[in-house]
Amino acid sequence: MFIENRSKYSLEETISKLTEAISKSDWKVIHTHDLQQLMHKNGHEVLPANVMAICAPKYAHKLLSPDEERIYANMMPCRLSVYEKSDGKTYVSRMNIEKFALPLGGVVADVMSDAFRDAEKFIAQVVE
């Protein structure tokens, strides 16, 4: 259900290149959460870790418009994690939302499959 790939770039470069690729599409970066900073503020030290919340309004609209699809709003926005491990390398991970949504069928399966394929194109630009 989860996929992890090593990035070709540093953490900062990976986030920058993903942000650039996403901004050149019809997707948006809603926010990048700095989990290392959050943990530090709460008295814990961890290696750098960021979660990018991304959204494609065309897909979001399909899940937020009909009442019967709104139950899936908790799967939105899509998230990409960019983090370092103790080996000093940067990784990108994400949930395989296509695999998760396919058994549900209908609109949610279509939307999540399309969203997954789009996100994989962004990720392919930064991973080995």
Image (tube, rainbow, N blue to C red):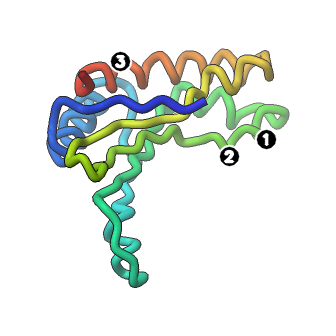
At 84% across and 33% down in the image, what residue appears? 68
Q: Which mark is residue 85?
A: none
The amino acid on which the numbered mark 3 sits, given as a three-letter code, is Lys
Label 3: few (<14), some (14–19) or many (≥20) C-alpha neighbours in 10 Å:
few
Tag 1's secondary structure?
helix
Mark 1 touching mark 3, by CB under 8 A?
no
Q: Residue 121 location, x and y as percent?
A: 35, 18
First of labels 3, 2 by sequence position: 2
Q: Is residue 20 or residue 45 the one in the foreground?
A: 45
Q: Which mark is residue 71?
A: 1
Q: Residue 16 location, x and y as percent?
A: 19, 41
At 30% across and 61% down in the image, what residue appears? 47
Q: Is residue 128 above or below residue 6?
A: above
The quarter holding residue 8 reads top left
Q: Is residue 103 above or below residue 84?
A: above
Tag 3's secondary structure?
helix
Mark 2 touching mark 1, by CB under 8 A?
yes
Q: Is residue 58 left or right of residue 46?
A: right
The amino acid on which the numbered mark 2 sits, given as a three-letter code, is Asn
Residue reaching furthest to the front:
87
Question: Mark 2 — residue?
Answer: 74
Tag 2's secondary structure?
helix
The amino acid on which the numbered mark 1 sits, given as a three-letter code, is Ile
Q: Is residue 49 above or below residue 82?
A: below
Q: Is residue 117 above or below residue 68?
A: above
Q: Is residue 66 or residue 123 the one in the foreground?
A: 123
**How far is mark 1 from mark 3, CA to CA?**
27 Å
Question: Mark 3 — residue?
Answer: 121
The quarter holding residue 101 reads top right
